[in-house]
Amino acid sequence: MSMKEEFKAFIMKGNVIDLAVAVVVGGAFGKIVTAFVDGIVMPLVTYVLPANIKWEEWVLGKFRIGAVLGATINFLIIALVIFLVLVKFLGKFINKKGEAPPAPSTRECPACLEQVPLKATRCKHCTSQL
């Protein structure tokens, strides 16, 4: 197989195309999240933090502690927004359409209240007949 054919086969794999689509969609989604944080969340944060303190300009010798602190706070806020929107909000919609939970594989022993397999005829904890 020639180098050209190998490269074509590599590019046409589903994983590469899926990754390319994910990067493009992720970049676009990143812009939405950034706009949401900058336009809605950060103005709400200014009500909590005093506006006259320039904490992002704090330095300790030559180290710009405020810049690191600012980037860390921005990251945590963006991560929180993504968690709330994707995991909590959209997760409710996805779970409603999802499959039913699997059937239980154990039951409770009436004598000792321990969990035993459904097919068991005797409890392994108290040896009572089920």
Image (tube, rainbow, N blue to C red):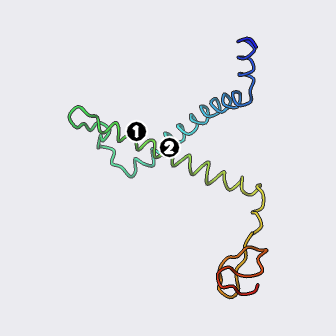
Residue type for callout 1: Ala
Q: Is residue 48 above or below residue 119?
A: above
The crowding category of the residue bearing disc 1, from other C-alpha atoms within 10 Å (few below 14, some 14 to 19, many at least 20), is few
Q: Quadrant of the C terminus?
A: bottom right
Q: Is residue 70 above or below residue 121?
A: above
Mark 1 or mark 2: whose residue is earlier in sequence: 1
Q: Is residue 56 above or below residue 104?
A: above
Instruction: State how far apart marks 1 and 2 are (Cα).
Output: 10 Å
- Who's the residue at 40% across and 38% down the image? 71
Q: Quadrant of the N terminus?
A: top right
Q: Which residue is mark 2?
A: 78
Q: Is residue 14 left or right of residue 46?
A: right
Instruction: Label 2, secondary structure: give it.
Output: helix
- Who's the residue at 41% across and 44% down the image? 73
Give the image location of residue 88, x and y in percent: 61, 54
Q: Quadrant of residue 12?
A: top right
Q: Is residue 30 left or right of residue 22?
A: left
Q: Quadrant of residue 10?
A: top right
